[in-house]
Amino acid sequence: MKHHTDIVNRLLREKLERETQAKTRRHFIKSCAQGMGGLALSSIFMGCDPLQKPKAIAQNSFTERDLNPLATLAPHYGPKVKSVIYLHMAGAPSQLEMFDYKPQLQKYHGQDCPQSLLEGKKFAFIKGTPKLMGPQAEFKQEGESGNWVSNFLPHFKKVVDEVAFLKAVHTDQFNHGPAQLFMHTGSPRLGRPSIGAWATYGLGSENQNLPGFVVLTSGGNTPDAGKSVWGSGFLPSVYQGVQCRSKGDPVLYIEDPDGISRNLKKSTIDAINKINKEEYAKYADPEILARINQYEMAYRMQIAVPEVMNINNEPEHIKQMYGVEPGKESFANNCLLARKLVEDGVRFVQLFDWGWDTHGNVREGSIDLGLRNKCREIDRPMTALIMDLKQRGLLEDTLIVWGGEFGRTPMQENRGNKEMAYKGRDHHGDAFTMWMAGGGIKKGASQGATDDIGFSGIEGRVSVHDVHATILHLLGFNHEEFTFDFQGRPFRLTDVEGEIIKEILA
Amino acid sequence: MQQLLGRLHPLIVHLPIGFLILVLLLQWYDRKANEWHKVIAIVYFWAGITAVLACITGYLQYQGEGYSYDSVKWHLWLGIITAVFCFAMYLKISPKKTVSFLVKAPISILSVIAFVLISFTGHQGGNITHGEAYLIEPLPNSVKSLLGFEIIEEKELALTEENWEDALVYEEVIQPILNSKCVSCHNPKKDKGALLLHSKEGILKGGESGAVLASHSKESELYARMVLPMEDDDHMPPEGKKQPSKEEIKLISAWMDAGHPFEGTVKEIGLKKDLFISFFPSTSYKSHPELEVPEASQDSIKSIEKYGIYLDPISESTHFLSVSCINKPNFKDDDFDKLRPVREQIAQLDLGGTQVTDAIFEKLTQFPNLSTLKLDNTGLTGNGIDALKNLEYLHTINLSGSLFDQPVDIFSSFKSLEKVYLFKTKVDKKGPKSLKDGQLILDYGGYELPPIPSDSIIY
């Protein structure tokens, strides 16, 4: 009994103590509200050092940009494109069966890989001495440019003269997660903003009813690196990619709950914002303005997003051209959606297609079978995407980037030093192919070359940072000046590297 | 202390200049009444005092900063003469009339002489600090040669896909880079660091720190200074001057690695094409006319934005705007007048998906700098579109998804038109694919990807 009284007494004492503390704090704040407000403001504006914002943003006042974080802004110099569609083949497609034709490799097929090539190299699965494996596809020079395309991509060859190839891209990462992070954020570790976040942060977005950065995934899985590949890192979170689903509700929880009418929703938001505005009048915290804006944006998105994400209204011949499968989650649907989004002024559309990791351990992951299926799945849609953007006059305002996180080895994978069930290739970052098409890109160009067996780049090697520098350049940014201050130093997408790949620019 | 006083010279010299200007003004106002002699004398007195101060500080600067007597002698003696002249004038004009010289000369003429004296002295001083070519430099080349000055070509390097192999390596590649980025300081008139970079002899001779060339660029002073960080004092060109591009530095380094030949073409020396690509003319898409337009007023921009129309500056380096009605699908002909205040600034106009009618073509002619015009997905039939033919910069019109039904030949009279999108319009898809000898491309779209057997093969 005594024990109980002790506890009650102690709780009462604690309660009293807390109350006193709270009261004094409240009193203190109230009595010097003005002084504190001033202090808070000064710290806000000090944090708003114009140097802290990229050049393009410095001209907008703090609250204005905060109230409308997606307001459009001027880039450093005249941009060549307004939007980017980035097609990422998650898992890393084999350049040796798609674009990088190596007839010499066929000659060495089945021979041991020379030790000199293996020394000091790290592979994800290859052990001991693997055997070289010749190209498992047939190649032909296509179009006026005479660039090589394999028979795995029978449609794509029709637009080969629209694209510029990068034949010798290299990365220093050989595992999917870090390599994907590197490809999309410029760092293999977590925490950096993705390209799309940088683009929307720097340029804002035209359509006020849609997010500036939309992500669409297909292939049954999201990328290994998780959502960080479209994250905003240390940038304000409003710039992160919004993942839309191509089946079901495009954005989760965007529909009003049953029994709640749109009018009721509107009056709810109005009421909340009225309170928020009163809060703002009292404390002048710009975060409150941002919140008000987000409520209104979400309300507008409720109408605009389902509309733009609905491909059923497209004419039949367009659906056929892309090969869409309404109601399913497919790369074709996503390509058509990408066109619709860009048409509606979305700044950055990021497509991830999963299932390109062709080690040869399973049938779907084999170079001669599974890869062909994956190629078929993207061949028609990505070709249609280029054609469709072109006929609508959108291709000159849009940049399309295609690639994986790395390439694949010229050697057949010998996981556990054993022969595998299917033909496969291991992860390989020394040389792989990417392509770009659209505004500012030199049509039919091909930059860089690999050695006879496609192991390393021997000419025109470009790094992931170079690719980033080029994308930012086309959007109108000087990648060396486009920075964000974080943890005491300015950060760039390209870190301290990156050179614009002028050879593929028109 | 001596040095500090010396460095105040450029400040103090402006005092006598001011006083002598004041003298001229006073005399002008007093030209009829002739009553202000006393005042003018006092101003002369102070002009003299400050001129003496200027002489003293000037002398200290000449001693302290290591100028040679030859370079300052004119300035020095003219300065002293000016100071003496001022005092003489004071004594002449002042009521006491203690000195009488040049009795017959009117005071106004003498004052003009005083002013000319000090102007000339000041100009000499300016030449010492800024160099003799300081005022000549910004003049256009035609005026320079008229004045008898040697012109150093400051043209940026320009090569083409066709001629790059035949360019003379030194004469047509390396020297032009040096001319545009280095020679403004390293020329015979202004040989900073005793280095001349305007000729083969100068480059070979080197400067104060010795040779600038080396058989390997990494050991060369010329190369090393260009790649030093900007913060380094030894970095060249100094901060604030025009910097060579990475590609130009690469070219200089490749030239040195090839043994810095002064003869021979690019092909003979064997420099690779990728060194030159960035100097080829770019055919990139023109986002706006190459013109200067005044900045649109913030008020008009704000009021148009309030109306739901987006106005984006095309870039930081121009005042041209890109205007989009993407958030205002109910934009009508009448709303057009809202854009009038920025009609000069609009280079890109997107009216896609709006309610505009054919009446807008007449209105669009008032937008002289239109470059890109998007009229897609509208109800336009194109009746009256030929009104746009005189728009000087209009290069792209997008009519896809509109009801356009005019004969496409009308576009051949358009001045700078390069591209017209006609997908999903009422025109015949089998019309000409280009006009004006291929300068104007007509894109009817309707691209197809017919099914092929492999579409359905699953492996």
Image (cartoon, rainbow, N blue to C red):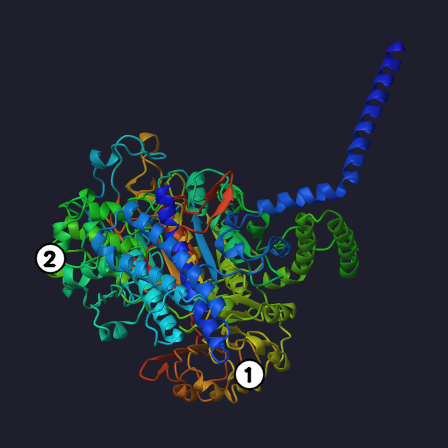
Q: Residue at x 31, y 70 (%)?
A: B139
Asked if labels 1 and 2 touch by Cβ distance under 8 angstroms, the answer is no
Residue B90, percent across and down? 41, 64
Tell which of A252 and A25 is nearer to you. A25
Residue A246 found in image quarter: bottom right
Please tell me which residue lies in front, A167 or A46: A46
Which residue is under mark 1?
Answer: B380
Q: Could one spot residue B219 in this view of the protein? A: yes
Q: Can you give x and y, in whole percent of width and height, for residue B114 in the image?
A: 36, 68
Parent chain of label 2: B
**Element marked by disc 1:** loop
For the point 65% across and 59% down, which residue is it? Answer: A301
Tell me the number on the disc at residue B117: none
Residue on which the image places disc 2: B262
Q: Along the polypeptide, which appears first: circle 2 or circle 1?
A: 2
Picture coordinates of residue B39 (x, y %)? 49, 67
Q: Amino acid at mark 2?
A: Phe
Instruction: Work out whether disc 2 and disc 1 sit on a shared chain.
Output: yes
Give SS at disc 2. loop
Count of numbered circles in the view: 2
Mark 2 residue crowding within 10 angstroms, few (<14) / some (14–19) / many (20+): some
Q: Chain of mark 1?
A: B
Q: Nearer the viewer, residue B453 or A222?
A: A222
A301 left or right, relative to B104:
right
What amino acid type should be assigned to the residue bearing mark 1? Leu
The residue mark sitting in front, 2 or 1, is: 2
Image spot of residue B67 (x, y percent): 25, 50
